[in-house]
């Protein structure tokens, strides 16, 4: 007991709207449902948790996680409640630490536990139809300052960690996870193949339809990682976890679950570093940066990209570095920094050309090809055109080249290219061509489950207002309004 209030638990308790007596009764009822009928909590004990900083013993933290997750409609973890994870000795972290609210980075032996617990709660929300997004995003500057030193060092096997040859034993790392066990190389092969299948589906159809399957697979991998494996298998398993976590985050971002997406990107960063793959950790952070730009926070995206670039290590391939530069350029364009954006895109082009393929790219980089390079350049110049209208012509050129190079199965990227092209045409005062490309995007959008495509379309719709007097454009505006899914809220651009 710290003797000080647990402010994190107090804040969540206030949001939930329970009385202390009501929470005590709910804890007893939920504990019995989870197989702990002997648990007896009362009002005074709840008061000690909140007002005196007392950390309850297992299974109470897991019971509280389930209760708050269901009540608030978003994933709540043991860390969110201000408790030390069960089975870990040590001082309870400062629940009111504004500089590092999520206690980042996690200790090596906690990553699998956090992963499994978070995915378990996410699956529970999926089953019950809860999609609340009331949590706040952690600022990019906070993530950067918390993780900088940690990401710049190589992982070391912690004292007392499992090693190959140990007797298999796994602590209960989370609630509501699948039964898992140690596995061999063939099972890891199958898991790696499943990542490719999910990745291809996401590129073609968007993240909505397969998100639950990816989260479930990640939950399974988290359980497997709780068991000891030979080093070469353990590294591959961490790689699978990192890839699945990035996919889960990207799919969550794709359907508008922004705080959940950010948490998965942080999980992916931890998993990649545990597997010794610092470039993968950097790429996971770059996804969080792209999310920040989409939400209108380009300055924080640049903070994250500085960490991604410096923390990814010298072994990062030129093509990966080129991809990082395109994200930075998009952030700079969002801020109206045209000169910096052009310089950064020039560096991206040089890096891309310099990669002669002597070292095969990792699986997670195979989606970034020449078409993607032009697609990102089109997006950057189209974004800059809001500040410098002359940039619209260059955006059109890159968007057309991206569309020419796109291969089959990249349907969502083609939609983005058409929207960039249409938007650039509107800015360039060419409503005739803009109408044509906008309709090409619109006809394909019903086949995807990507909210981001609708967010981009809304931005383009804003540009059509100037041409509402044109018959074709007015028809287009009406078609967009009719096609827009009614259950999608307005985009969160500029908000968190």
Image (tube, grey):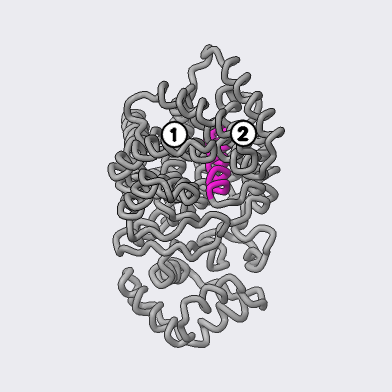
**Residue 382: x %, y % from top left:** 55, 37
Relative to residue 230, is residue 246 depicted above or below? below
Taking the spot 57% from the left edge, 76% from the top edge, the residue there is: 10
User: Would residue 62 appear left or right of 143 to someone viewing this image?
Assistant: left
The residue tagged with tag 2: helix, strand or loop? Answer: loop
- SS majority, magenta: helix
**Residue 272: x %, y % from top left:** 53, 37
Taking the spot 34% from the left edge, 78% from the top edge, the residue there is: 29
- Which of the pair 475/80 is nearer the observer? 475
- The quarter in which the N terminus is drawn is bottom right
User: Hey, which quadrant is residue 159 in on the image?
Assistant: top right
Answer whether residue 156 is visible to the viewer in this image.
Answer: no
Disc 1 residue crowd, few under 14, some 14–19, many 20+, Cα 10 Å: many
Span highlighted in magenta in the image: 275-294
The residue at which mark 2 appears reads as 390
Q: Is residue 12 magenta?
A: no
**Residue 112: x %, y % from top left:** 47, 48
- Which of the pair 331/155 is nearer the observer? 331
The residue at which mark 1 appears reads as 417
- Which of the pair 201/358 is nearer the observer? 201
User: Hey, which quadrant is residue 63 in on the image?
Assistant: bottom left
Q: Is residue 278 magenta?
A: yes
- Which of the pair 18/287 is nearer the observer? 287
The residue tagged with tag 1: helix, strand or loop? Answer: helix
């Amino acid at each position: 007991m710290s003797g000080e209030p647990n402010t994190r638990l107090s804040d969540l308790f206030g949001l939930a709207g329970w009385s202390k007596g009501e929470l005590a009764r709910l804890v007893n009822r939920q504990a019995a449902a989870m197989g702990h009928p002997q648990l007896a909590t009362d009002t005074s004990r709840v008061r000690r948790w909140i007002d005196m900083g007392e950390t309850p013993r297992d299974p109470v933290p897991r019971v509280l996680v389930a209760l708050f997750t269901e009540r608030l409609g978003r994933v709540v973890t043991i860390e969110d409640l201000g408790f030390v994870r069960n089975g870990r000795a040590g001082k309870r972290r400062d629940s009111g630490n504004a500089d590092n609210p999520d206690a980042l980075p996690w200790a090596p032996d906690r990553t699998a536990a956090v992963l499994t617990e978070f995915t378990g709660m996410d699956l529970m929300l999926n089953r019950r139809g809860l999609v609340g997004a009331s949590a706040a995003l952690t600022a990019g500057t906070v993530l950067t300052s918390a993780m900088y030193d940690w990401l710049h060092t190589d992982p070391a096997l912690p004292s007392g960690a499992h090693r190959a040859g140990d007797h298999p034993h796994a602590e209960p790392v989370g609630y509501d996870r699948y039964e898992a066990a140690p596995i061999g190389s063939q099972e890891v092969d199958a898991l790696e193949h499943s990542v490719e299948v999910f990745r291809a589906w996401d590129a073609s159809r968007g993240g909505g339809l397969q998100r639950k399957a990816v989260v479930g697979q990640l939950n399974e991998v988290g359980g497997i990682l709780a068991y000891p494996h030979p080093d070469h298998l353990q590294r591959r398993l961490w790689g699978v976890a990192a890839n699945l976590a990035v996919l889960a985050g990207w799919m969550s971002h794709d359907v508008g679950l922004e705080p959940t997406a950010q948490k998965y990107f942080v999980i992916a960063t931890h998993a990649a570093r545990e597997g010794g793959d610092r470039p993968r950790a950097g790429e996971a952070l770059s996804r969080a940066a792209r999310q920040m730009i989409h939400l209108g926070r380009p300055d924080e995206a640049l903070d994250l990209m500085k960490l991604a670039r410096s923390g990814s290590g010298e072994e990062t391939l030129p093509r990966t570095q080129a991809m990082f530069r395109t994200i930075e350029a998009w952030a700079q364009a969002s801020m109206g920094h045209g000169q910096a954006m052009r310089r950064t895109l020039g560096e991206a082009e040089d890096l891309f050309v310099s990669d002669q393929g002597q070292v095969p790219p990792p699986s997670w980089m195979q989606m970034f090809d020449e078409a993607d390079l032009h697609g990102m350049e089109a997006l950057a110049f189209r974004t800059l055109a809001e500040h410098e209208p002359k940039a619209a012509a260059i955006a059109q050129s890159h968007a057309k080249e991206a569309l020419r190079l796109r291969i089959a199965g990249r349907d969502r990227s083609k939609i983005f290219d058409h929207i960039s092209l249409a938007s650039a045409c509107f800015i360039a005062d060419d409503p005739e061509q803009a109408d044509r490309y906008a309709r090409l995007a619109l006809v394909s959008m019903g086949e995807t489950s990507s909210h981001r495509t609708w967010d981009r379309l809304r931005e383009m719709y804003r540009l059509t207002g100037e041409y509402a007097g044109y018959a074709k454009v007015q028809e287009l505006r009406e078609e967009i309004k009719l096609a827009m899914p009614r259950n999608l809220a307005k985009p969160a651009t500029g908000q968190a």
